[in-house]
Image (tube, coloured by chain):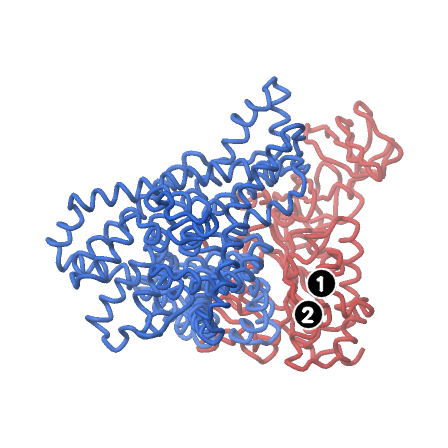
Chain colours: A red, B blue
């Protein structure tokens, strides 16, 4: 698929800011997306994700800051490139297909007045719609429309693809399948991609890097594994999934807490919070040395798994996510220990207490 | 902040410029804004100039306005408007119910037949009425009698206007009845109400907005009607205004009467909004799950059919039959040549198409401004675009005559002025459908096109215009339909020697030459029917 490959270039945002008086949508945002990789901009609704995307696409002028793709500056001091000259492909949340054009008409729109039929066929092949070139877009299913939108964005071999909540209009089963397909398509096209989502599972499953956004700023960037297992703040930790916070005491690369003695970075010492995902808390009738005594006080059964609520000797409660079998019941006396990655942060600061939006 | 302007799609915010909020967050491109200001100013010109004339000669103008004769004319005008509106509702309500909610045989056919009288302008209807029943008319011919009872005056004007305006109520009533949730009626019946009580307590309240809209259109039509009342020799403000203008050169008196007419129109609009707000109904819960149920008519079927038949006969079949009768008589007598009629038709088409094109363009400018660059200024310009709605055609024409004679003598009695008048007068009709179809197009679609490498003008051409084409056509068709039928404005503003179908019909009828009026009338109906059909297919018929 040589024709779909672009000279991949990195995206760079510096101090990007935009406010709609009086609300501040984007507050001095810095972000880099490596050439040819897919980055998820993840955050709760209203955090400024979509505004960031619209600023990059040139659909809104920023108040301040710089946007550059490779060496090309799109917004900066004295520079503001019009949207049609940015070489950026955008896939909108509602796809924004042209209802008066057929599939080929939509895909060929970005290829100029006399589009290259070969290129249209090639891109349609890439998204698996080779036989649908002549169909009117309103006849297509939601998933097919989404692929047309992606093909349309890819056709002019843009330097960057932006996707705005691309899977939010699809039902759960289709969403899962399309995520994988889109990931494969983007990998094959080797195009730098930034996509916006509020769905943690989506960000974790498709992106090569994730930027977690909160109140107009980037809270943390990293690989999905880093973000999930080593969140930079309790807020990020909670936003990415259920998390238990257990108080501990750190010294010399170890941290002692009620669930045992765990490895920790050498840099931390003193009073800390240990962040543990429920699936990293194991329970059993007997346990390894250092395991805590606990009592089962509640249980929610989800079929494939169960969430078991435990009360530790101190009265502190934590949750453990286990496979659905065997079943645990309130009243069971068990041993609980940590079996998986944990993260250690200095004892809670006020800002981090805020609930996940 | 500095330097971010460049080629950005919308300019940067300019701090410190106090009037920035007037232009909104997204600045419209300067040429579009300039076009919008031109359109708004043009639409406002007749009303503003009328105001200037009245204010400049306030004493005499007020004297005319508060004259005892004027008061009588106002009473006659309002009396006729009230009578016709009540009659139109009395006709439209049962016909609407019969054609939507009963098992009346051939409902579709009745719907078409009973909507069609809308294409017959009131002055053609009045002319046909006189040509059939008046002195030397068809009936007198057939009966061979010397004299018939007079048909002129209030009764004639009331009958003619009622017969040709009731479709203005029928259309909104039908569309409301079709959207009513039949489950509400079922609920009322289940709670022990009889069908009659159910109609009164459940259906009628929901019909009020439709009756108010339709009734307003009828009332505005009657207040601004010139042709029918003139032919039926019933004096209202409108034809008195015309006579005052024509007979004397007392422009102040005419302006004073025009101001009274505008006040009546505004009064009707105000009354309508009061009724509509007081009776506003909202649907609770999801939309109707089932189509409305058809009530069986039983033995009432035959009276219902007879009623519909009689109406179709009076409002459509007889007028067309009379028209055909006089046309054949006219052709055999050689009183109208085909070349002459074709010339009239060409003139009508030229003015109609001209007004339709400019009206649609002006409406598109306003719709894009208010739909894509919302700001206090855009909204104000769009509202100004509706100013022509509050002025009867005759007042628009009069105001423009004042304007031309005082400020632009070169434009006086030119085709440009005539088309300008028709455009600003009927512009509001085009704003509705064009604005509605633009609202259907998501701005995301246009942004997607920008991102694919096309500039704003190219995006407008290749994406926006094709998507709102239906609305543009509907708006243009509405303006065309009304512009070709417009009588008083054409009479006042047409260049000397420039006759259209409408002016020819009026001239010949006022001399009692029925044969000579017949062919132009028939051509006018033939021209007006296709756009009306197009519009009724789209379901966007208004006025």
Residue furthest toward the right? A326
Q: Out of B399 and A19, give the one closest to the viewer.
A: B399
* Label 2: few (<14), some (14–19) or many (≥20) C-alpha neighbours in 10 Å: many
Give me the chain letter of mark 2: A
Q: In the figure, is residue B233 to the left or right of A18?
A: left
Relative image position of residue A113 (x, y in whole percent): 64, 80
Disc 1 from disc 2: Cα separation: 8 Å
Residue A317: image x %, image y %?
A: 70, 31
The answer to which quarter of the image holds residue A217 is bottom right
Residue B4 marker: none
- Up-down: is B154 above or below B182? below
Q: Secondary structure under badge 1?
A: helix
Q: Position of residue A283 (x, y in %)?
A: 82, 35
Q: Where's the N terminus of chain B, which quadrant?
A: bottom left
Quarter assignment of residue A354: top right
Task: Say which residue label 1 marks.
Answer: A137
Where's residue B76, x and y in %?
28, 42
Give the residue drawn at x 73%, y 30%: A312
Marked residue nearer the N-terminal end (1 or 2): 2
Residue B362, placed above or below residue B313: below
Q: Residues within 10 Å of mark 1 (few under 14, many from 20)?
A: many
Q: Indicate the chain on which mark 1 is placed.
A: A
* Residue A229 seen in the figure: no
Q: In percent of the image, x 48 and y 71: which residue is there?
A: B9
Residue indicated by mark 2: A106
Q: Nearer the viewer, residue A324 or A116?
A: A116
Q: Quadrant of residue A265?
A: bottom right
Task: Determine contact: label 1, label 2, CB under 8 Å.
Answer: yes
Query: In this figure, what is the number of numbered marks?
Result: 2
């Amino acid at each position: 698929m040589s024709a779909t490959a672009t000279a991949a270039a990195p995206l760079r945002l510096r101090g990007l800011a935009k406010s709609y008086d009086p609300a501040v949508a984007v507050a001095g945002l810095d972000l880099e997306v490596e050439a040819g990789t897919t980055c998820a901009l993840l955050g709760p609704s209203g955090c400024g994700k979509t505004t960031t995307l619209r600023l990059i696409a040139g659909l809104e002028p920023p108040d301040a800051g710089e946007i550059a793709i490779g060496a090309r500056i799109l917004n900066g001091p004295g520079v503001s490139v019009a949207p049609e000259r940015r070489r950026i492909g955008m896939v909108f949340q509602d796809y924004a297909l042209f209802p008066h054009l057929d599939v080929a008409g939509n895909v060929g729109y970005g290829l100029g007045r006399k589009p290259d039929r070969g290129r249209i066929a090639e891109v349609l092949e890439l998204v698996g719609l080779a036989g649908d070139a002549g169909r009117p877009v309103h006849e297509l299913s939601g998933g097919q429309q989404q692929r047309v939108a992606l093909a349309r964005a890819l056709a002019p071999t843009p330097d960057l693809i932006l996707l705005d909540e691309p899977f939010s209009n699809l039902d759960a089963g289709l969403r899962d399948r399309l995520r994988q397909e889109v990931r494969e398509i983007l990998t094959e096209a080797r195009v730098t991609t930034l996509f916006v989502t509020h769905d943690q599972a989506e960000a974790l499953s498709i992106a090569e890097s994730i930027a977690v956004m909160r109140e107009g700023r980037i809270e943390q960037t990293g690989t999905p594994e880093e973000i999930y297992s080593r969140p930079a703040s309790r807020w990020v930790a909670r936003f990415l999934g259920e998390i238990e916070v257990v108080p501990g005491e750190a010294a010399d690369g170890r941290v002692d807490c009620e669930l045992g003695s765990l490895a920790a970075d050498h840099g931390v010492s003193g009073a800390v919070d240990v962040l543990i995902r429920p699936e990293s808390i194991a329970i059993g009738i007997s346990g390894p040395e250092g395991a805590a005594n606990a009592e089962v006080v509640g249980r929610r059964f989800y079929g494939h798994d169960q969430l078991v609520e435990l009360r530790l000797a101190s009265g502190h409660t934590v949750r453990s996510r286990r496979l659905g079998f065997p079943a645990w019941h309130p009243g069971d006396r068990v041993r609980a220990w940590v079996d998986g990655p944990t993260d250690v942060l200095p004892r809670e600061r006020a800002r981090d207490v805020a609930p996940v939006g | 902040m500095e330097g971010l302007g460049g080629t950005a799609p919308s300019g940067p915010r300019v701090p410190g410029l106090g009037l920035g909020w007037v232009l909104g967050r997204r600045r419209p491109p300067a040429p579009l804004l300039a076009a919008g200001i031109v359109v708004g100013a043009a639409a406002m010109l007749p009303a503003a100039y009328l105001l200037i004339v009245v204010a400049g000669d306030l004493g005499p103008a007020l004297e005319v306005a508060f004259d005892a004769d004027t008061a009588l004319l106002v009473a006659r005008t309002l009396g006729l408007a009230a009578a016709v509106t009540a009659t139109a509702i009395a006709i439209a309500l049962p016909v609407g119910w019969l054609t939507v909610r009963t098992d009346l045989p051939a409902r579709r056919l009745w719907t078409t037949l009973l909507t069609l009288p809308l294409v017959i302008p009131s002055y053609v209807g009045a002319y046909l009425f006189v040509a059939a029943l008046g002195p030397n008319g068809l009936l007198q011919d057939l009966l061979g009698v010397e004299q018939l009872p007079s048909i002129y005056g209030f009764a004639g004007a009331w009958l003619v206007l009622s017969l040709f305006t009731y479709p203005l109520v029928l259309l909104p009533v039908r569309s409301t009845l079709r959207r009513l949730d039949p489950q509400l009626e079922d609920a009322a019946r289940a709670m022990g109400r009889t069908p009659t009580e159910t109609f009164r307590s459940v259906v009628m309240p929901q019909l009020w907005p439709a009756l108010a809209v339709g009734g307003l259109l009828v009332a505005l039509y009657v207040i601004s009607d010139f042709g029918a009342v003139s032919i039926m020799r019933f004096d209202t403000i409108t034809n008195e205004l015309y006579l005052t203008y024509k007979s004397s050169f007392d422009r102040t008196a005419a302006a004073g009467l025009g101001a009274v007419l505008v006040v009546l129109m505004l009064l009707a609009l105000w009354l309508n909004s009061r009724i509509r707000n007081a009776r506003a109904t909202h649907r609770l819960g999801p939309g109707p799950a089932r189509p409305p149920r058809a009530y069986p008519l039983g033995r009432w079927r035959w009276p219902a059919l007879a009623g519909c038949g009689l109406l179709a006969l009076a409002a459509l079949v007889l007028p067309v039959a009379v028209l055909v009768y006089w046309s054949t008589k006219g052709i055999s007598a050689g009183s109208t040549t085909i070349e002459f009629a074709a010339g009239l038709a060409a003139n009508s088409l030229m003015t109609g198409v001209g007004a339709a094109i400019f009206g649609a363009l002006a409406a598109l400018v306003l719709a894009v401004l208010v739909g894509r660059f919302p700001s206090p200024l855009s909204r104000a310009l769009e509202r100004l675009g509706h100013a022509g709605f509050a002025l009867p055609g005759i007042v628009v024409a009069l105001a423009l005559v004042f304007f031309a004679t005082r400020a632009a003598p070169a434009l006086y009695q030119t085709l440009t002025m005539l088309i300008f008048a028709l455009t600003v007068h009927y512009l509001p009709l085009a704003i509705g459908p064009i604005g509605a179809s633009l609202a259907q197009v998501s701005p995301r679609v246009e942004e997607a096109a920008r991102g694919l490498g096309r500039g704003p003008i190219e995006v407008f051409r290749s994406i926006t215009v094709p998507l709102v084409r239906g609305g543009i056509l509907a708006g243009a068709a509405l303006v065309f339909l009304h512009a070709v039928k417009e009588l008083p404005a054409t009479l006042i503003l047409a260049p000397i020697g420039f006759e259209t179908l409408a002016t020819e019909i009026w001239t010949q009828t006022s001399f009692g030459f029925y044969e000579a009026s017949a062919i132009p009338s028939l051509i006018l109906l033939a021209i007006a029917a296709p756009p009306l059909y197009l519009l009724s297919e789209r379901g966007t018929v208004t006025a």
